[in-house]
Structures are given as structure tokens and as C-alpha cells.
Amino acid sequence: MVSLTIDGKKIEVPLGTSVLQAARMSDIFIPTLCEHPRLSLYSGCRLCFVEIDGFRTLQPSCTMPVAPNMVIRTDNDRIRAARKFILTMIFSERNHFCPFCVVSGGDCELQNEAYKLDMTHWPLAPNWKKYPVDATQKYYVMDHNRCILCRRCVRACAEMSGNFTLAFEERGANSLLIADIGVPLGDSSCVSCGSCVQVCPTGAIIDRVSAYRGRETQLERHKTLCIGCSVGCGVDVLTRDNHLVRIESNWDAPVNRGVLCKLGRFIPLEEDRQRLVTPMVRKNGSLQVATWDEALDLVASKLKPLIGKKDKGIAALVSTRLPAETLYLFKKIFADGAQSDLVTSIEEGQPTALPANLAEEMQKPFEGSLDVIHQADCVVLIGTNLVDNHEVAGFFVKRSLPNGVKLVVIDPNDNPMDNLADLVLKPAKGNDIELLQGISATILKQGHAKGKSALNSEKCIEAARKVGISVDKLVEAGNLIGSALKPVFIYGKGVTTQNSSSVLKALLELAEITGALTKDYSAVIGTKGEANSMAAVQYKLDKPFILNGHQAVCLTLGDHNTSPRLLERLTKVPFLVVQASYASQITAQADVILPVETWSEQEGHYVNLDGRLQKAIKSLRAPEDVLSNETVLKSLASRLGLKVDNKWKEQLLERIPTVAIVES
């Protein structure tokens, strides 16, 4: 620990702490513009100047490390004069006429710092030229006239998403933010993660949806979860008058730490499906408005005669976007109460059933946490696309590559990560096991193995060669993976949709050989599917959905997007009940429609891909006649004479999971 004095206050902080961090630990305010807690230090704006005894000039506090017995002053006439001069230069350099800016009035960090110094004008005559406004990007606009050259956006693009799209060209006052080699943002390699929007301190980068819809002080902020996939990112949902205004990443969320993809930040704002706001029943061939009692009584009358019929009775299907409480109730009613032989999820266990069965066979979890990616020196992707799915996990991988982390992609299909990989292996479909065993055998033969194996090296290498993988490729893969100190293996549907667990077992054996899987440690990660895939498989909602003369189907859909394949399988169902938030082709053919809450109107628990049990909260109020999925299911259970309980958490933990479930 280091002892120092800031503004007369004696404090102790760890060695290596910056003066700015030390001040914040002591609740002492120092203004900043270019600094951001989640980004590397740049020390470009100099607004954080402080006075330190023994130093002739003022020093930037963001990059100045503390020293024993240091005496620091953060606010006096000299410091205020320097800060006012810095702000004067920034204001005079580009067009910062605040009344015309979308973030003026409390949301602009530049303007706020000026007001704190009682600046109502700047003495230097404006000396700016007109800069272009780039509106080619789908989700946000880049106005170079508002840019203060803080480079937060550039650092966020590189350090948060690992995309490296943004940079600056020219120097000094001529510096200009560019995408790639100067192409329009909409034509660039931008992946629309929106990190640049969230970190921009001025109105230089603004998102299209929330512009002019209210200042920060006029919005309500709700800390909840993104349910776009099984990564389980923490988000802040900003609302006003019960309308969704903006979604931001939660900087303190344990999973993503401020990183977010377009699926979590922008896609929910695009929702334009027709909302269902009242129950409907089919009468005389057409759907007509009904009361809740009328709709639920009709459902109960149709389902009661089918209770207990194992064959040709009720089939039930549920969305894995719904909370664990809802999934549990769904299973309790249809599997336990109605004794249906077909109760499953829309995913049908494709991303989870095979690993879950293997965990039960092994009698222990075998997967690890996403956090292991941050310490990896080699990442192996097998059968997973981390660009189009689970993109935040892909960001974790991409941003580590410039630091020397090696990337190996094993995928018979074209993979968006191929162009970033140090090695790409394209086994013929169905030959993954030969490739994985061939790599394991090569590692054993090279003497890189950290674990034991009974594999016959020569036999496995020959088998890999026969299915189209050259010995040179195997040697290269063995060197890259085998020599790594902290390898990480990430697998997806390319593995889990196999007919047997042989490929996954071969992957686990490779992980053991390389030290990525031991008794107390695992660097094997399964990407799962939708937000609550893990919870669904824990409740054994993971069997194939194959109708065989079933007389009724109860579909608890929520706000899940329907697929043509599901629609086709439901076309000839004698009686179809759909709990849904939006109208679709499936609701159009339903016999009863029960309107329910969307993701932002419901609350409940989710288990993400690395076993974190997290709670989502309500951000919006549902329309008046729309109920929660839980309320609907409980009302239906009451009419069917079925008892339900609230033991969702106990049953969630009954089955051995693929990754240890821990409440976060």
C-alpha cells in the first residue's frame, strides 16, 4: 500500500494505482473526457490535470502513478485556469454550438464540464470548418463536427469488440475519425456493436432511435438481462413513459463487463410485429375477440379429456427465451400433471441434450466459465460460429488475438472467423472424431501432452489422414494447441447435433491431454442456444418434437420468432393453443390465442451458458389485458384441477448440469 495526501485527505491505495483512481476511491472528483474506466489510458484531453508537490508543471492524473508521501491538489485557481483553457481550445476547434446538439442539456460530458467551470462562452473566435456527417450506418450517425478527438470510440472498437474498424487519419486539427481505409461507415467492417455510441462523450456518435426522445434525467434506467442468446449479458434498459428508448450495456455486469452486440443493443428496438392485446378464440372458422375466462374455459374443456393419455393426447412446446419459473410451471402442468408424452422446448434440445446426457454419464459437470477466454493463449473453435451467434463470446476471442493469442477454427463449413485464424481445419462432415483424435495423437507424439491417454498415435494419425487431413496440418495443429499453456476449447451445434457423443468425448479427451480439463478446472465451453437453453435441459425439456396423432398442442411461445419448420409441423393439429406476444402465421392458425408479456415486460431467472443463475427484471408495463406466462399457466392449471408449486430452483439443480450452476 502507498500513503499519500489528496486535497488534505490522507489515504492509502495499492501500489500501481493512478492518481485519478486514488481520487475516485476517496470520492474526490477530477474531470475527464478521454478517460473511460473500461478502456486503456490515452491521456489526450489533459482535463484531469492536478498539481503535485515537487512537479514544476501540472500533471495528467489518469496516467500518473501514485508514489509514497505524494501530496496532490485537484482544485485551485491554477488548475481551474488550465482546465478552462483546455475546454476553450476544444470548443473553438469544431462546431460545438450546444443548442443545436442532440445531447445538449445534461447528456454531453463536454458541456457539463464547461458548466462546472462557470463557462458561458469562450473567448477565442471559432476557427472551424465544416466536417461531413456520416449517416450511412443503419443504427447510428457519426457527426465529425461534434468530435473532440478523444479516441474513446477507437479504443472501444478495438478493446471491447476486437473489431478494429475505427481509426484516425491526418494530425492535429485535421484529424478525422475514419472507418477502415476511409469508407462510409455503412460500407465498413463495423459489426454494429454500438460500443462507440455508448462511450462517446459528446454528440459525435448518436444512435438513431433514442435521439431527441429525452435526456438522461428524464429516462428510467432498469438493470436487467439481454435474452438474445445464452451468453446472458447484463444491460441497462432506458425507458420513458412506458416506451423503450435505448438499450445500453451494463459496465458492471459479471458476464460482459460493458460489451454488447447488436442483438442486445439495437435489434430489440426494431420490433415492428403486430402486438396481441386480447384473447381470441376460433368461432365459425375465424378468430374472434374473447374474454380471458372464455378463452381459458375453452382450453380447459378441450384438454381435460386428454389428461393422462400417454398416446395421442396433449403435446406441449415452450420457448427457451422464457424464465426458469415459466419453464418449470410448463413442465409441471403438462409433463407431471397432464402426463403428456411430448413436452419439450422449441429448440428440442439440439444445443444441449447431448452434452447434458454426457454429464449424467460422467456424473459430473465438464464445462467451464467464459472467464477462461480472458486468460487463454490459444482458442480452438469447433463447430461454432461466434460471429452470427453468441457474438459477445466472439468479441472476447477477437480482442485477444492482437496480444498473441492463437486461434484454431475447426469447421467443415465456411466460418466468419476463418480469416482471423492462425490455422483453419476443414474436415469432411461426419469426420470430426478422426480429426480430434488425430490432433490428440500428434500432441502425444510431439511430447506436448499434459495429461494421459490410451490413444494409439500412429493409428489415429493415419485415420485422420484418410479423411482428408494432411499430416502437415495435424503437426501444425498439434504444435499450436499442444504448446499452449492456457488453451480454451469452444464448441457449438456442429458438435451437439451429432448422432452420438463420440465427437464430444474426443474433444474432452483432447482438452484433458492439453491440460484444459482437469479434476478442478475446465476450459471447455459449450455455446448452448437461446437465453434459457440451460434451464430447459435441466428440466428435461429436450426431446424431439415429433407429433404422432396428438389431439392438442399447447405452444407457450412468448415473443419468440417462429420458424417455417415449426409452422409446417403445426398445420394439421386438431386443436392448437398459443401463448404469444405477437401475431404470426402460427397464431393465425391457432384455435385459441392467449396474449402474454414480452421480454421487457416479464421477470424471472435465466441460466447462461457458463452456469450463472441471473435474474431479469421488468422494464416496461404490459398492455392492460395482457398477462404473464406464469399467470396464464397457473390459471390453466387451476381449471384443469392440477396442483403446481414454486420449487423451480430445487428441480433446476436436481439434474447434473454440464457446467456448475451458481447464483450470480
Image (cartoon, rainbow, N blue to C red):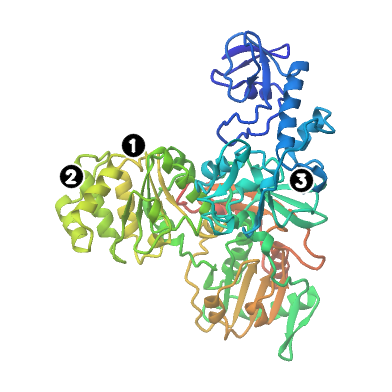
Is residue 252 visible in this depiction of the protein? no
Q: Tell me the quadrant of the picture where the N terminus can be found.
A: top right
Under circle 3, the secondary element is loop
Residue of label 1: 485
Of callouts 1 and 3, the N-terminal one: 3
Rendered view: 248 above or below 135: above
Q: Mark 3 points at which residue?
A: 103
Disc 2 and disc 1 in contact, CB within 8 angstroms:
no
188 or 310: nearer the viewer: 188
- Residue 539 at x, y percent in the picture: 54, 59
- Which type of secondary structure does the marked residue at label 2 adopt? helix
Closer to us: 371 or 647: 371
Q: Is there a contact, CB below 8 Å, between mark 2 and mark 3?
A: no
| Numbered-mark total | 3
For the residues labelled 2 and 3, the Cα–Cα distance comes to 62 Å
In the picture, the quarter occupied by the C terminus is: top right
For residue 197, say whether it is visible: yes
Q: In 3D space, how far apart are the residues under numbered discs 2 and 1 (Cα atoms)? A: 18 Å
Q: In which quarter of the image is residue 432?
A: bottom left
Residue 642 placement, left or right of 311: right
10 Å crowding of disc 1: few (<14), some (14-19), many (20+): some
Q: Where 522 sits versus 78, above or below?
A: below
x and y percent of residue 322 in the render?
Answer: 62, 60
